[in-house]
Amino acid sequence: MKIRQAEEKDLTEILEIVQDAVNLLKQNKVNQWQKGYPNKEVFINDINHKTLFVLDEERQVIGFCNLSKDSDPSYEKIYLGKWLTKINSYVTIHRLAVRKEYYHKGAAKMLLEFSEKYAKENNLISIRVDTHQDNIPMRKLLEKMGYLQCGIIHLIGYSDEDNERIAYEKLL
């Protein structure tokens, strides 16, 4: 398995993985990714900005994540806690998902490990990520990988009833 930058030719497989994730989240009663986000346009934008990476096994995309070095406006205010770092020297992980056949087989862990390597190569000191409070598998994985729960953030651009996320950070 290798991780590489996503290309437009990967879109069909990426959207299949999104549907796997949407179905799993719905089955687990997690109100995340249930309203048409993320969609094809989001991933095209990620590809054009070179922030989307795919986990590839024998030319099949089995997972992906977005890694952004830009400060995330949703992370400017944190409630019921505080970030581990005060400076904007972090990578943000968004839109991480894996193909259903690879659940619990280390694919998401590989993407997180790649994110850490990517951050270090770019001289950044931490990684930030958020997830829905009911997304227990993701929360457990983050905590197992050494991410610390820092507080609550509100996603900008979402309705008030759907914008609260648990924020995590890991120092590198």
Image (cartoon, rainbow, N blue to C red):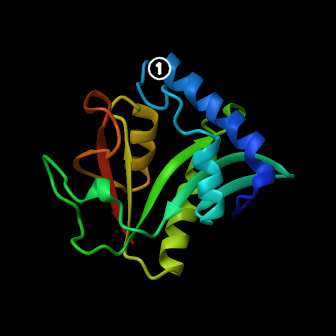
Q: Residue at 35% across / 43% down in the picture?
A: 157
- The correct choice, above or below, for 27 with respect to 87 in the image is above
Q: Specify whether residue 110 is in view.
A: no
**Residue 103, image quadrant:** top right
140 or 70: nearer the viewer: 70
At mark 1, the secondary structure is loop
**Residue 102, image quadrant:** top right
Q: Residue at 59% across / 38% down in the picture?
A: 39
> Is 167 situated left or right of 109 in this image?
left
Residue 10 on image: x %, y %: 77, 49
> Is 171 situated left or right of 39 in this image?
left
Q: Residue at 32% across / 52% down in the picture?
A: 168
Name the amino acid, label 1: Asn
Q: Which residue in the structure is indicated by mark 1?
A: 28
- The correct choice, above or below, for 36 with respect to 40 in the image is above
Residue 2 on image: x %, y %: 74, 61
Residue furthest to the right: 58
**Residue 51, image quadrant:** bottom right
Residue 8 on image: x %, y %: 76, 54
Check the picture and name the quadrant holding the N terminus.
Answer: bottom right
Q: Residue at 41% across / 25% down in the picture?
A: 31
Q: Specify whether residue 57 is in view.
A: yes
**Badge 1 density bin: few <14, some 14–19, many ≥20, Cα 10 Å:** few
Check the picture and name the quadrant holding the C terminus.
Answer: bottom left
> Is 56 situated left or right of 42 in this image?
right
Residue 161 on image: x %, y %: 27, 27
158 or 172: nearer the viewer: 158
